[in-house]
Structures are given as structure tokens and as C-alpha cells.
Amino acid sequence: LSTSEGGDIRRGITTGKNEFFYLDVDKIKHWGIEKEFFKPVIKSPKDSSGIRLKAEDLQFYAFLCHKDKSDLKGTNALRYIKWGESQKTKEGQVWSEVETVKGRKNWYELPERSPGLLLLPRIIGKSPRCILNTCEAQVDDDLFEISGDDEDALKGLGIYLNSGISFLQRELIGRANLGDGALKIEGIDWERILVPKKENLLKLEKDAGKAFEKLCKRDVADIQAESKKKDRIEFEKAILESLELPTELAEQILAAVVGLVEE
């Protein structure tokens, strides 16, 4: 999985102090933080139960301020920043001096960057999927983002990364050191995923796009239930046909994924 196949992978934002940077509706209202200083954020794959992320799925916002305090006079955002500077950790260290934030130009300033379209989790459970970040939410470091200049190839990659072939590889490369059957997959692991060449990704969108849209309209079940759903099997067959592989492998691949998850 690399730039040459349609996308560039990177880890989501590490805030360094979630208590400050992640806002809920109540905190925004309490401080009256201006709308220009926050955007929706996905903190975990559990925030969404489907493939296509919706803004209404998200309960938190990221505090995003790219101005110096001298340019914030009279704003509620500045009041909030000053409040943050008055807070201390359990060890008595003020938030603005915590190691994870003090090296920034402004401790309260997260990196300014465009969110990736495709989101892959660091921790995978029994409901494997690649989330489509069509609402352009900010992304926590519990996920990896994939972005790229070729939008069509990126869409094809999103389709492929939601297929049984991709799921099978995830189960084989994942680090089985977590409880309850969960796997950890770091960026270096995701880069080992084999994906089709760009021309095949473009063909995937054409051949399997309609079947994929059906999956995007519903929640994704755990892999055992998912493997038996008619629309899932139709989608897997469309993927295999587009890649010029025998369509009868569809149910066998899903069964293999189920077996690995159960193990």
C-alpha cells in the first residue's frame, strides 16, 4: 500500500492533550467558542458503524486555532486557551508545559492539514472495514488516513480495502497481542498490504462501484454475519470478476477471514 497505488498513508493527529483539544457540544456552549475554531473529529472507528462516515455520527469536535494569542483578543477561543493554561495534570504540571505539546510554536495549535478520504483503524475487531471520510472530519491517531491526488484511484482503493481480499491480508499481518481477538495494525503493517495497480483500481470503481454503494447504505455487521449477507457476497464477486479472478472464491475468502478472526 503506497502512493504509487493511489494513496499516501499517515497516522491521524496526536493532540498531546485530549482533555483540551476534544470538545463536546456542552463545552463549546459553555465557553461560547467561535465556530471557526472547531471542526468535527472521529476519535475511534467505533464512532461510526457504517462504511461512509456522516457528520451526525460524530459527537466530538477538535479545537483548531492557527492564530497567535495577540490576534485572538476579544474572542472566547482566547478565554478557553487561557483556561487551558491554568489547568494542571495530576503530577502538578500545567497543560501548556506537558512534553507532548510544549514543543509547538503555540502549544494549543494542532497541525493544519486536509483530512484523508480513507480511514484505516489501528485496532481491528470483528467488523473490518475501511471508512470513507466523505464529511472531511479531522482524524485522531487511533486511525490512519490515506489521501492522494488521483481521486478516482483513491475511490477504487477504498472499494478494494473494503473487500474480503483486503480483510484476509489484515488478519495475516495484524499483531495478535491484544485481548478479545482484537488486532493492532500500525502504519508499517498497512504498507505491507498488497493492492492492485492503479489501472485496476480505476477499473474496480467501474465494475464494483454499484455493489459497493449498496454496502455503504447500511451498517457493517461482524464478519461472521457479514459473510452471509447477499449484498456482501455480490460485492465480493464483483471485486473478483474485475480482478479477473474466479468469482466462486468469494465465499471461500470470506469463510477464511471468519476462521482467522475466530482464531
Image (tube, helix red, strand yellow):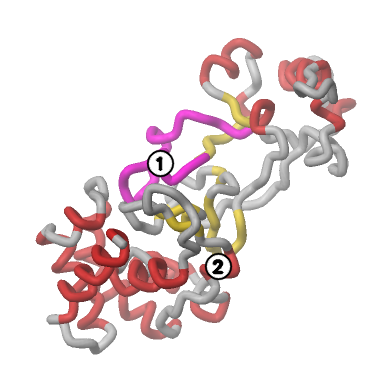
Image position, residue 73 (x, y; %):
83, 19
From this view, report whether residue 214 is shown above or below residue 140.
below
Q: Is residue 255 left or right of residue 124?
A: left
- Residue carrying label 2: 148
CB atoms of marks 2 and 1 within 8 Å: no
Q: Quadrant of residue 30?
A: top right
Q: Could you tell me the amino acid type at mark 1?
A: Lys
Is residue 117 visible in the rendered structure shown here? no
Image position, residue 131 (x, y; %):
40, 54
SS at circle 2: loop
Foreground of the two, 92 or 219: 92
| Mark 2 or mark 1, earlier in chain | 1
Q: In the displayed orientation, state which residue is furthest to the left.
A: 230
SS at circle 1: helix
Foreground of the two, 113 or 231: 231
- Identify the residue at horizontal 86%, vertical 38% (top origin): 102
- Identify the residue at horizontal 89%, vertical 26% (top origin): 70
- Residue carrying label 1: 46
Image position, residue 187 (x, y; %):
58, 64
Segment colored magenta = 43-63
- Identify the residue at horizontal 24%, vertical 71% (top origin): 256
Q: Quadrant of residue 251?
A: bottom left
Q: Could you tell me the amino acid type at mark 2?
A: Gly
Find out whether residue 54 is within the magenta segment.
yes
Q: Is residue 71 left or right of residue 208?
A: right
